Image: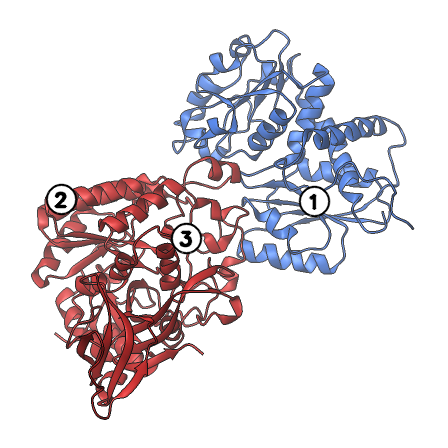
Amino acid sequence: MSASPILPAFPHRHLLGIEGLTAAELTTLLDMADEAVAVSRQVEKKRATLRGRTQINLFFEPSTRTQSSFEIAGKRLGADVMNMSVASSSVKKGETLIDTAMTLNAMRPDIIIVRHAQAGAVQLLSQKVACSVVNAGDGAHEHPTQALLDALTIRRNKGRIEGLIVAVCGDILHSRVARSNILALQCLGARVRCVAPTTLLPPAIERFGVEVHTDMKSGLKDADIVMMLRLQRERMSGSFIPSSKEYFRYWGLDEEKLACARPDALVMHPGPMNRGVEISSEVADGGQSLIREQVEMGVAVRMAVLEAVAQHLPDY
Amino acid sequence: MTNPLMTNPLMSSRTHLRALINADLLDPATGRRQRGAVLIRDGLIAEVVRGALPAAPEGAEVVDCQGALVAPGVVDMRAFLGEPGAEYRETLKTASRAAAVGGITTLVSTPETNPPVDNAATVDFIRRRARDNAIVHVAPAAALTRGLEGQELAEYGLLLEAGAVAFTDGARSIANARVMQRAMAYARNFDALVMHHAEDADLTGDGVATPGELASRMGLTAAPREAETIMLERDLRLVRMTGGRYHAAMITHAQSVELIRQAKDEGLPVTCGVSINHLALNEHDISGYRTFFKVKPPLRPEEDRLALLEALEDGVIDVIVSDHNPQDVEAKRLPFGEAAAGAIGLETLLPVALRLANAGSVSLARVLDALTARPAGLLGLACGRLAKDTAADLIVVDTDSAWVYEREAIRSRSKNSPFEGGRMEGQVLRTLVSGVDVHVAG
């Protein structure tokens, strides 16, 4: 089999983060994902792109939706998918990471999807294996496929990303989703705002080129997209904010606060939601919500990413 | 009180005469630099001759320095040496060999061993182990509080008698102000030096980087630099209350420099140190999650580094330390947040400091003072000067020669150097401890 004569439009073997990608590369992935949406809506959803390839989903943190999304994406492309959830308590975490990477590498997989609680862990693992690596979330660093699926959802609903005002709201300090989204949306020309209580804002966040708000109503004013973040349960009671009740009162998205955004504003959430903490049920299930569509786009984006990195596999 | 420098067997056994001639003598204590010679007898400096040596004394072994710099050996006030309890990371033998190559002739060991150095028996153990295994002097620092737990005072008097040279809880801060006040007041009874790691551990939390754009982009938990200044301000108030001799072990922040400067202007018995890592590296070195650059406190922005260099030149910062902290590979081959903090530094302390001097960041005389005379003076050791009847702990240095610090050449038991592969300027040609060669460049 000979190598493709056309240079791949996505020139990276791994997808470790949004940082370092160009607008053209992001657009390529989104275009590929649009095609994957069409495939996924057919009765016959199966492609042969990854036939004979082995994909391992290596999750050091529990995850239902991201892991199943990657699994479905891989299977639709014809890959053999294996899920591996590593209990983080049994062995010292980091040892497990390198040891597991070496062990898995010896099984000659083609693509490994990794999620880990520590920033930089996926990059570290990518240095130890011969196959392609896709970051499914590393600590508070990046979650690139989430940012891509959010961008795809926005583009399909608004027809564009450039020039839109996107308010990212909630626990930005601990959020890899926020970091990847800020990078991706800015790269594609959106104006990004960060709206959060001061204790949940990362230091020097304004240096990312975002507008910073601590008040939801001013932060949401004229926004085209309101993107809510999940607040981890362990951060709700006293350490970063006094209570979930107070948090919902000032930073939870309800209809009153949403009314400050543009009338055609759309609401997003990476899931899983804490209803009544960062978002009210009325808004989550309301007409402006894209939350369910995000899940569908997740599979399509992951198909696109798998295809894009697979172009760099030997004998593709 | 025993002389800690007497631990080394090399010192007492040699009676022969040596002469280092054709030397470019630099005495950091005075700043004087002059051609001359050093005569050594019985492990001590017998005479420092300015100008040409009239004639080498009869029977003296003559070493021609060929114009190379001769200065006192380095006194490193902060090094983790592994024994007892962490011999897999470092031993007195391996550390002392690395030290000899790096021109260090006295190592002050930190007490964070297992068991910790909080009783006279453990001080004695280290001194005996050093006597038998180390080729440079080892001067133990003992714990400020029992078990390094920050609650009960250690036996400063008995520890001093056993040979401890200073008191510190290592990288641990004493959070309880009342304990710290009593430690400083009680230390006064013996004129003991309290070396404190000024850091509010609660404010630091699990932070591993300095707050700012870089840490936020990398998704790393950040620890505010104010954790250092808050603790330092508290400590300086306690110095005013107690009058005890206080040494801030390692400052890293420009604002800490100002606090120390004010305290010194006030006339308080306050001194401070800085690690070579914080002088030579900055926060951007951790890019790519390079765990060899993970140190505690974390590397700081360039503004801080420049302020530290300036304070070193001004003398606000008294001493430079290696903060030698050997970690085995497994402790570093981890994601950044989980990796152990610390860097080895015995072999690179002097060469990196000389590189800073060669670059004009700080003067050679001040760098050497901060590595020799100043720490020796704070610890009350009879070394660190080119003076008659002090220990003949000397280094012969080619200050210009360029070389690369290769991993294969690392003598430390652990290899976690942030300077691996780095270009050095200045090489130690010969190291003498108590008049005896412990390293001669091959």
Tag shown at residue A14: 1
Identify whether B375 is placed above or below A49: below
Q: Give the residue pinned by disc 2.
A: B265
- In this view, the residue in front, B270 or A285, is B270
Give the structural element (helix, strand or loop) at label 2.
Answer: helix
Q: Is residue B383 visible?
A: yes
**Residue B65 falls in image quadrant:** bottom left
Q: Which numbered mark, 2 or 3, is in the foreground of this view?
A: 2
Q: Give the chain letter for red.
A: B
Viewer-proximal residue among B409 and B363:
B363
Q: Which mark is residue B295?
A: 3
Q: Farthest residue to the right: give it.
A: A1
Residue type beneath disc 3: Val
Give amino acid for label 1.
Answer: His
Whether pointer 1 and pointer 3 mark residues with C-beta atoms closer than 8 Å, the reply is no
Question: The numbered mark 1 sits on a residue in which chain?
Answer: A
> Of label 2 and label 3, which has the lower sequence position?
2
Residue A138: horizontal and vertical position, in percent?
58, 42
- Chain of the residue under label 3: B
When the figure is inspected, residue B315 is found, relative to residue A296, above or below; the finding is: below
Q: For the view shown, which residue lies furthest in the left direction?
A: B189
Real-space Cα separation, disc 1 to disc 2, in angstroms: 57 Å
Colour of chain A in the image: blue
Residue A15 % position (x, y): 68, 41
